[in-house]
Image (spheres, helix red, strand yellow):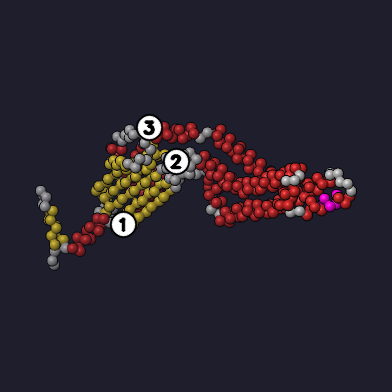
Amino acid sequence: MNTDVVELKTINEVGLPLDPETFSRVILDFLGRKENLSYKSHDNFIINLEDISQFNHILNSKISYQKNIILEHFSINFGYSDGTFREINGSEALSKFLETRSIDTTSINLNWKIIIKFDHSPTIETQEIDLLFISSIEKKINDEDFSYIELSINHTNQSWALDILSAFKDKINEIAIKPSILKEKYNKITDNLFFATIVPMFFIVLGLGLTIPVAQNETQRLRQDLVQYNLKQNYKDDLSKVVGLLNITTLERSELKELGTKNKEIEKIIEKNLKNVALHLTLIVLLFIIPFVVRKYIKYSINYFNHKSFILVNNYSQRKLQKYKDDKSKITYIGFTVFVTSITFSILASVIFKVLDALVF
């Protein structure tokens, strides 16, 4: 059988006769016939250097019982808000790590490469674990957060990978900040297509249903005020009074306006009526706005009660975390709550009062 010889020409030369098929099989066995196991969490989190060290310790404890660990490489890549990245290698470098710049850390990527021979495998194989933390620390206190944790395990042994996944998920749950009950309920409601459709439609129909009666009632009220004005006038006889009433009640609004320019009292009555119409329409517009105001307030409350993600690797990030906690003023939140509640109920009360007033009239 023809064979090709692979030679390594170094100080100590090694020659290994391999045919192409055997050589390909050796390389493939080394790289491993990999599968991928992944996990992603959108929970916020707080992670520090000690937590990073613990992740490395967890992995070491999981592979310590393996007799055939050929190589293990651990690297950490820090991403900063100015677009720079810093990579260190090994647990010793992590223990000596010091970041002196006053800058936000927006990401941490932990990577392990392991060359291992499992007990029931005839060859050595490579495994790779990648753990990524993304933080939106640069956002303000009431902005929506966008943070996540992503774990990816490229492996050749599923039971081993599941064991690593379970151990890492337990640690991730320790540093994760679970969303508030308010946020969970809000997301559940807003994800409901029926609710998202029926509420806006309700306010649209309500607003349109109030607009037409308001216009009709105000026109009728204007006629009534003009009739009252006409009855108070001193006419020479009843015929003149009847003619005046017919004139008032049959003129169009544009003709009444022209009449008002000749009679200051009628002009005042028309102006007062126009103000009432404008007030009614303003209240109806505000009624349309209420759902958006309430939704904005709920999102504000959710962000207030939630906690943003922080990556604590220097004194600057520690100070920023403390400032973030201090900025969550209860007085400001309570004041805003009272303001929004007062405005909302005032609008609703005004609209209800105007509707009842129109119905009674």
Residue 181 can be seen in this image: no
Does the magenta-highlighted stretch encompass residue 263? no
Residue density around tag 2, few if under 14, some if 14–19, many if 20 or more, within 10 Å = few
**Front residue of 77 and 101:** 101
Residue 343 in the image: x percent, y percent?
63, 40
Question: In the rendered view, would you say 96 is above or below 253?
Answer: above
- Amino acid type, label 3: Asn
Q: Secondary structure at mark 3?
A: helix
Check if mark 3's residue and mark 2's residue have beta carbons within 8 Å: no
Separation of residues labelled 1 and 3 (CA atoms): 41 Å
Residue 139 circle label:
2
Mark 3 highlights which residue? Answer: 315
Tell me: 140 left or right of 86.
Answer: right
- Amino acid type, label 1: Lys
Q: Mark 3 or mark 2: which comes first in sequence?
A: 2
- Amino acid type, label 2: Lys
Picture residue at 45% right of the left edge, 43% below the top: 44
Separation of residues labelled 3 and 2 (CA atoms): 19 Å
| Residues shaded magenta | 241-245
Q: Secondary structure at mark 2?
A: loop
Residue at the far right in the pictured view: 237
Picture residue at 82% right of the left edge, 53% below the top: 246
Residue 105 can be seen in this image: yes
Residue density around tag 3, few if under 14, some if 14–19, many if 20 or more, within 10 Å = some
Q: Nearer the viewer, mark 3 or mark 2?
A: 2
**Front residue of 182 and 161:** 182
Q: Secondary structure at mark 1?
A: loop
Residue 170 in the image: x percent, y percent?
42, 45
Residue 271 in the image: x percent, y percent?
71, 44
Q: Mark 2 or mark 1: which comes first in sequence?
A: 1
Mark 1 highlights which residue? Answer: 34
Q: Mark 1 or mark 3: which comes first in sequence?
A: 1
